[in-house]
Image: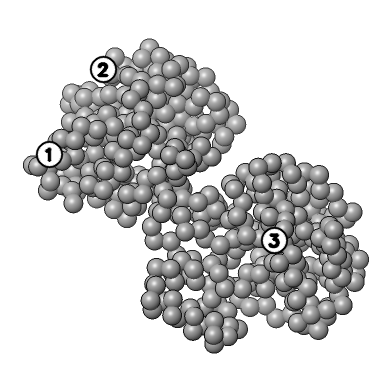
Amino acid sequence: MKFIKVAKPYDRLYTTEKTTCIMYSPRISGKSYAMGQLVYVWANKYPKHDIVVTRAHYNSLEDSLYNEILAFAADIGDGRFYTGKTSPLRIETRKGNTIYFKGIGGSDYSRSKGFKGSKPISLIICDEAQQLKDEQSLRQAIATFIRSVDAEIDARIVIAGNPEMVKAHWWNAYCRKYRFAGVYEFIDANYLSIKKYLSSVTLEEIETERKFNPLMYKFLYLGELDELAGGAYGQFKRDRHYISVEEWRKETAGQRLSYIVWGGDGAITNDSTGIVPIAIYSNGQGFVLERFYYSPPETGIVLAPSQISELICEYVEKMCKKYDIYTEHVGSYFAVDCAAADLVTQLRYNINGYHIVKGFTGKNIIKNNAVVNNCFAKNMLKIVNFGGYYDFYKRKFVPTTADTEPLVYQLESVTWKNYKLDPEIPNDYTDALTYGANVYFNNPDNLYLPKRSVFYE
């Protein structure tokens, strides 16, 4: 094998101790060239193993990495190492291994399940991951190919994709989530990483974009996302509405806690249960206090309504004690999704009779959502960052950041689709917030009352 010089930060593809690497980088960042290099190195390093290259659309593979792989070998003077084949698309190497090309997009999650190579796999590449319809498509494809990966060698799974302009796009959310988890190697690059390899024409075009269209420059060439374009809760801005405990105490100094409205969304099948309490202070502002989260997809257990209501009652009693709800005669109202009728019934039966428990029935998705966006726009609703939340099922505190806090995560992920919230994106906690906010803020006076104008912009 010829000597290969690898540009930083792509050298981490070879040195990392983690199996999976994610390239979350904008255009002209050198991803394709780096993957062409990696295929050549791994094909030589593991001649008794095959390689799989995937993309959402099979028809676009030949014009992308297929040609990139062949071109790289030709550029370093080893073009005869590869022999390109079509029908089906594949590349055979001089050492006897094969590079397969597979389409993994479309509506059928199982379309890749029939893959069976003749040798174990050393490298899996998913190119342009953002073109897949959702995370499930990626997961299903990886699950298919990973069965053939040889655990005895230094195998790699490389997932590459460009940031999407809609911040709520699943690929953006996926990368935010797993970057925090720390289980994958993230390789971040942009055109500045490979600037010395770019032509003067390319650099001039990028510079023109920077001068005359700075927002598009940031998106296309730096991968920076400024706004929540397309997001259902587009007025939510984490720098304004996700505040520290210190900020919350400062803003509520001298104010009395008047009401607490507990918005709730209960799991109907395997979705999540959330209780989002909005504390309404005497100045009319609302602050979201400690949240209750229970996610069956994470625990693998769907609790019965009676079981989940017991956990909620325990949570509510702790909250009431902490905030003197009973002793200070703070009004308390539960607005729980009427579709979770069993949970509503159980709460009415189990919870302290001090609380009013109602099923939220006035569900007009667009109007209800508009109320929440109006609250954020008027600066009348903020979420307090407690550094995490207590998991009443696992009996432990779960630390979070702004990227992994469940409510904030959903506020930045939920999108519209055909005038409805996209059903593919979890929205249990944002629904809970929406129900609670609408109990109080759907009255225009509670948003626009003149004497309260000092508290919002």
Residue 52's place in the image compared with 259, above or below, is below
Neighbour tally class for label 3: few under 14, some 14-19, many 20 plus, Cα within 10 Å: few
Q: Residue at image x 71%, y 67%?
A: 63
Q: Can residue 126 be seen in this view?
A: yes
Q: Name the residue under label 1.
A: 449
The amino acid type of the residue labelled 3 equals Ser
In the image: residue 411, left or right of residue 353: right
Farthest residue, direction top:
349
Q: Earlier in the sequence, mark 2 or mark 1?
A: 2
Q: Which of marks 2 and 3 is nearer the N terminus?
A: 3
Q: Mark 3 points at which residue?
A: 60
The image position of residue 276, as x and y in percent, is 35, 34
Q: Residue at image x 72%, y 62%?
A: 61
Q: Which of marks 1 and 3 is nearer the N terminus?
A: 3
Neighbour tally class for label 1: few under 14, some 14-19, many 20 plus, Cα within 10 Å: few
Nearer-the-camera pick, 299 or 345: 345
Residue 301's place in the image compared with 355, above or below, is below
The amino acid type of the residue labelled 1 equals Leu
Give the number of the disc on residue 354.
2
Number of numbered markers: 3
Q: Residue at image x 56%, y 62%?
A: 162
The amino acid type of the residue labelled 2 equals Tyr
Nearer-the-camera pick, 79 or 417: 417
Q: Is residue 19 visible?
A: no
Find out whether the residues at labels 1 and 3 contact each other: C-beta distance under 8 Å: no
Q: From the image, state whether disc 2 or disc 1 is nearer to you.
A: 1
